Image: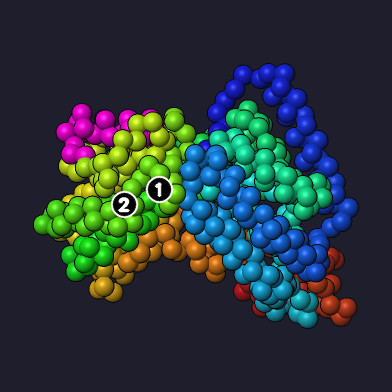
Amino acid sequence: MTTAAAHEPTESSERSSSDLTATLRRMKDAQRRSGAPPYEDRIRSLEKLERVLAARKNAIVEAISRDFGNRSKHESLVSEIFLVQGAIKHAKARLREWMEPEERETGFVFLPARVELLPQPLGVIGIISPWNYPVQLALSPLVGVLAAGNRAMLKPSELVPETSALLRDLIAETFPDDQVTVVTGGADVGEQFSRLPFDHLVFTGSTRVGKLVMRAASENLVPVTLELGGKSPTLVAPDFSMSVAAERIISGKLFNAGQTCIAPDYVFVPEASRDAFVEACRSAVARMYPTLDKNADYTSIVSDRHRARLQGYLADAKERGAKVIELNPAGENLESSRKMAPALVLETTEEMAVMQEEIFGPILPVLTYKSFDEAVAYVNDHPRPLALYVFSHDRATTDKVIAGTMSGGVTINETMLHVAQDDLPFGGVGPSGMGHYHAREGFESFTKKRPVFRQARLNTTGLLRPPYGKTVDRLLRFLVG
């Protein structure tokens, strides 16, 4: 993910800071000159983004796959193209409604004045996007930014250089550089970017780096939307089929090889059903991915460093007494590949790294409970996650979990699909993030709801100005007693 770790100042980082500051100043000047764009201009901007996404979809898919080593074409089309297209269509269909002034109630003393909230663009928005969904997580926030009438500077991840370069080029071909621009570079550029005095900053990445970004933004009191991660739990109730649950959980876990911020991070199943769930997972992997190495449907781990990190989690778990079950249907040797076989981890303990860190890979710890309430209590004893998944056909059970826990979003009897709903906001809570984008809430995140009081030609507020007399005394006795 894009990092914002501290660096010693260097000539190149100072020069980058100067260039970035000049770019931001130029964009803010353009925003001030043009003011809030009308509805028609915002629709045209969204349509331009929609057209270039459709025209360059194959190039996007290919660039992402080259950066990953292998990225499933179908996963890229769904997650990078389809989801952003859906967000654009939704915004276009509802933008006029979102832009309408909101009438509010005027205090009776001030009648016949009127009061209202006017949604106005904040200005220039910074977007720092990660490597795991490098197009979607850059352009989905941009949809809300453009709909709200703002300009944007994007900083994509250096871990996917071909995709970042393509994103830079297609944005440059589509928008004037004082409306939307892409800044590429490494961690030093990311750090300087996070310190700029934007009117709002969006960061998607790890909780650790999110804290650094928020600290950097605070120097200029820049409001932030943080889309972070954490360990998203999955709870399977006793009434739900283990085979059906396993298929749906494995499907969500192995999408993008688990490199998804809302992927199921661990699963709770009834103690008596653990072995059945494990076998169901084994069967599900064999059906979906009968081979791994040359299978175009199975995505690689993005880098050798991240693969080594995941292998380290498994080694640590084994050393601490866990049982690791590799799900490798064809028994392939993947040592020379960045692909990694799915693995279930049983008999975990809290001190294991796999239970402490967000996994972000094809590893699934399987925990058990004697009482379903134990699983719910475990979730509540840990930091609030970005997503929560519950499998049960009993509405009372699912409602009890929703009412008794807190997470960024919830999907019942499936995984991850809440994020694909165009009319639902997306965002975390506490350690998993703050703020929203997507849907109307995205538009509102990048909008100032500006309170406006419109005085009437004929009014009585002159009575409240000095010199005060008996009329004001009588009025105040009526108002305050």
The location of residue 258, given as percent across then percent down, is: 39, 47
Report, in whole angstroms, how far the alpha carbon at label 1 lies from the one at label 2: 8 Å
Tag 1 and tag 2, C-beta contact below 8 Å: yes
The answer to which quarter of the image holds residue 130 is top right
Numbered label attached to residue 439: none
Colouring chosen for the image of the structure: rainbow
Please name the residue that numbered disc 1 is placed on: 295
Q: Secondary structure at mark 1?
A: loop
Please name whichever residue, 109 or 388, is drawn nearer the observer in this view of the structure. 388
Please name the residue that numbered disc 2 is placed on: 290
In the picture provided, is 264 more to the left or to the right than 5? left
Please give the name of the residue rendered at 76% of the width and 79% of the height, measured from the top-left corner.
Answer: 111
The answer to which quarter of the image holds residue 89 is bottom right
Q: Is residue 296 above or below residue 236?
A: above
Please name whichever residue, 107 or 156, is drawn nearer the observer in this view of the structure. 156
Please give the name of the residue rendered at 18% of the width and 65% of the height, measured from the top-left corner.
Answer: 238
In the picture provided, is 302 more to the left or to the right than 440? left
Residues drawn in magenta: 307-324
The location of residue 240, given as percent across then percent down, is: 22, 67
Q: Could you tell me which quadrant the C terminus lies in?
A: bottom right
Observer able to see residue 390: yes
In the picture provided, is 362 more to the left or to the right than 144? left
Q: Is residue 465 above or below residue 256?
A: below
**Total marks placed:** 2
Residue 314 counted in the magenta span: yes
Please give the name of the residue rendered at 28% of the width and 53% of the height, measured from the top-left corner.
Answer: 286
Q: Amino acid at mark 1?
A: Asn
Q: Amino acid at mark 2?
A: Pro
Observer able to see residue 228: no
Q: Residues within 10 Å of mark 2 (few under 14, many from 20)?
A: some
Q: Secondary structure at mark 2?
A: loop
